[in-house]
Amino acid sequence: MNWTNIIAKNTVFLFCILIMALMPDSSWAQENIFSELKQNFDEGQVFKADFVHQSVDSYTQDTTSDEGWI
């Protein structure tokens, strides 16, 4: 192995380390959102939603649908 190969491999390795160091930590963002949601529930806020779900059987082409609220 010559010096050019060693330098190239080390450069790629250091570049990968740099990219990983600069990437945002997604687990922190998830914790922050979860904490805000938990605080809303603790404060007694109520969340509700309407939904409509439709599915089509790929073999018979029968369509079923459900709707309601949560």
Image (tube, rainbow, N blue to C red):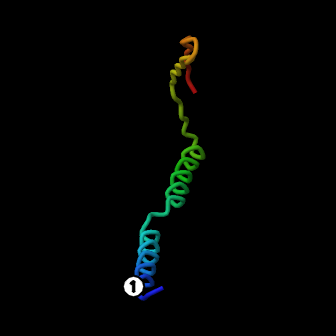
Q: Residue at x 51, y 24 (%)?
A: 50
| Residue 59: percent from left, percent from top | 58, 15
Q: Is residue 66 visible?
A: no
Q: Is residue 44 visible?
A: yes
Residue in the foreground of this view, choosing between 68 and 22: 22
Amino acid bearing label 1: Thr
Residue in the foreground of this view, choosing between 58 and 2: 2
Which quadrant of the structure image shows residue 3? bottom left
Which quadrant of the structure image shows residue 4? bottom left
If the image is split into quadrants, where does the C terminus sit?
top right
Which quadrant of the structure image shows residue 21? bottom left
Residue highlighted by disc 1:
4
| SS category of the residue bearing label 1 | helix
| Residue 11: percent from left, percent from top | 41, 79
* 52 to 21, vertically: above or below: above
User: Which residue ends up furthest to the front in the rendered image?
Assistant: 1
* 12 to 29, vertically: above or below: below
Residue in the foreground of this view, choosing between 69 and 66: 66
